[in-house]
Amino acid sequence: MSTDHGRVINFGAGPSALPLSVLEEAQKGLLNFQGTGMGVAEISHRSKEFQTFLSDFEANIRTQLDVPPTHRILFTQGGGTAQFSAVVLNLLARYRLLRPDAAPADTEARRLSAGATVRTVVDARVYSKDGRSFDNIPPHAEFAFSADPALIYYCENETVDGVEFSHDPQSPAAFPFHLLPRDKLVPLVADYSSSFMCRPIPHLADHAVIYAGAQKNIGPAGLTILIVREDCIVDVDAAAKLGATPVPLILSYKTLADSGSLYNTPSVLAIYMAGLVLERMKQNGGLPYYEEVNRRKAKKVYAAIHEGEQKGVFRRKVQQGSESWMNVVFEVLGEGAEKKFLDGAEKQGMKGLKGHRSVGGIRVSLYNAVTEEEVDKLVAYMTEFMAQAAPEAQNST
Ligand SMILES: Cc1ncc(COP(=O)(O)O)c(C=O)c1O
């Protein structure tokens, strides 16, 4: 089944679906950006038209996420992967400036900081059903933060296994902000790559750095958004003189901040499309609107999985309370059943449902551009699949 332009329903984990209206608008911008007579991929990033677009985009993120004046919004490239390195280098430089005499303090942090200690605050696998999976947010009592860390890192939504911190502050699966010291500026870093702009960010002001690749919820790959607290924008060269690892200028938050995120050529097209998405989000009512729709979408899919569990057809992967809103992961039980599920879905025009290669199963990504109507179609298919598979499941038990 195809919709407009022969498009299917895309449940892919990223790059992922974008709103049709944005894609149509972007077609126009590709030919003629804001009446300049040049397409957006052809125009100088230093042109007044692009710079105005960039500052409107930034303002749109600031307003919708309610980013306080203590934090800068910066744009860069390299995705979450580049930030795995950049955030470590910048915050080690900050730490060195704060503690010039201290000994220089997962794998990337260890590589980049000779002599540093990397503590795993908590290993979720220990609390998993099989002792080796990431299927839960561990109990708060098990979080062991270092006393004076250069940075504390967490991933808000883990895209592969479909585990996410709850945004209900009362939930045992919420991030334990209450365990962080209150008396100083905590170097708390959050990877929001797969949940950026799907709902408000709890305790945003308490973060040192939040980063996200655009390619899940708000645009094409190639753009990375950073929200950086002012005290984390440090002189990396001064820190290097004190013994910190030198930071490549393009990875330095100070370089980005001083140049208005235009130190070198940015990913102009990705910024343009993400800007259009943000504008559309604003017109739809902003994050409160998306939060409600995303809540309903996830609820519907988890309810269908639950029904399938009762019938012996599906099995959830993630423990109760730790389920992601954005990436719903489950198994289809029985020999060859997953392939049958995927083939059947594809026949009905639903793609991108295959789980990550490292964990298998089915993964339904419910990013902002996936509509509630599309989710209803998937749920109808899951119900239909259960009706066919349940008698077989019963016969095999
Ligand atoms: C939560 C999260 N962090 C980081 C990454 C890596 O991002 P990138 O491929 O943009 O470097 C991904 C990729 O999908 C992700 O989902």
Image (spheres, helix red, strand yellow):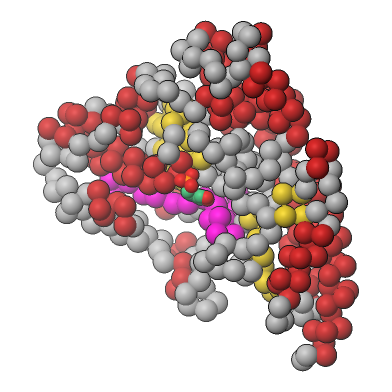
Q: Nearer the viewer, residue 48 or 183?
A: 48
Give me the residue at 62% from left, 36% from top: 218
Q: Quadrant of residue 143?
A: bottom left
Instruction: Quadrant for the C terminus, please.
Output: bottom right
Give me the residue at 31% from left, 52% from top: 108
Q: Quadrant of residue 233?
A: top left
Horizontal and vertical percent for residue 302?
Answer: 73, 62
- Does residue 105 show up? no
* Residue bounds of the magenta highlight: 149-170
Horizontal and vertical percent for residue 352?
Answer: 68, 55
Horizontal and vertical percent for residue 240?
Answer: 16, 34
Is residue 163 shown in magenta? yes
What secondary structure predominates along the stretch shown in magenta?
Answer: loop
Give me the residue at 52% from left, 79% from top: 130
Q: Nearer the viewer, residue 149 or 297?
A: 297
Is residue 58 shown in magenta? no
Q: Is residue 137 above or below residue 78?
A: below
- Does residue 26 show up? yes
Q: Is residue 107 above or below residue 58?
A: below
